[in-house]
Image: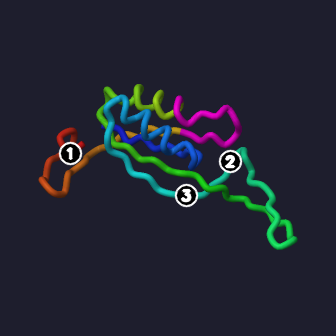
């Protein structure tokens, strides 16, 4: 099992959700986060004063899947989230040791 974590631009969330639904993946967790990398933030004007915004809004997706689905999932996320501009995000893939469905007690692949 793997845990795929993706950090994407907020306005791409619906596109990514649709793309992963099309390949048969129906469960994910979404968290609103802030961060910066090469994008380095930007300046904004508020009530006549200019200030630096270092942390930009992003969306973090977490998806637990079987090993054989990883490549298709990563391709779907990258394809749907890509704008070609700086700050598109990143995808991380981790090994997942154990998963348990709380309601039924099912474990590992059965819990996904």
Q: Residue at x 82, y 73 (%)?
A: 47
- Check residue 7 for magenta coloring: no
Q: Secondary structure at mark 2?
A: loop
Residue that numbered label 3 is attached to:
33
Q: Is residue 68 left or right of residue 7?
A: left
Q: Is residue 19 above or below residue 32?
A: above
Whole-percent x, y for residue 74 in the image: 46, 31
Whole-percent x, y for residue 36 in the image: 67, 52
Binning the other alpha carbons within 10 Å of mark 2 as few (below 14), some (14 to 19) or many (20 upward) gives few
Q: Earlier in the sequence, mark 1 or mark 3?
A: 3
Quarter of the image that includes the C terminus: top left
Residue that numbered label 1 is attached to:
111
Q: Secondary structure at mark 1?
A: helix
Quadrant in which residue 72 is drawn: top left
Give the Cα separation between the discs numbered 1 and 3: 27 Å
Binning the other alpha carbons within 10 Å of mark 1 as few (below 14), some (14 to 19) or many (20 upward) gives some
Quarter of the image that includes the N terminus: top left
Residue that numbered label 2 is attached to:
37
Q: Are marks 1 and 3 in contact (CB under 8 Å)?
A: no
Q: Which mark is residue 61?
A: none
- In this picture, which residue range is highlighted in magenta? 79-90
């Amino acid at each position: 099992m793997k845990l795929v974590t993706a950090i994407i631009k907020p306005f791409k969330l619906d596109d990514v959700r649709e793309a992963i639904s099309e390949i048969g993946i129906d469960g994910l967790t979404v968290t609103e986060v802030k961060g910066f990398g090469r994008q380095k933030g930007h300046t904004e004007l508020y009530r006549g004063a200019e200030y630096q915004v270092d942390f930009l809004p992003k969306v973090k997706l977490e998806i637990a899947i079987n090993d054989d689905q990883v490549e298709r999932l990563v391709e779907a996320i990258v394809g749907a989230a890509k704008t070609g501009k700086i700050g598109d995000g990143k995808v991380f893939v981790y090994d997942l040791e154990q998963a348990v469905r709380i309601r039924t007690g099912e474990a590992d692949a059965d819990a996904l």
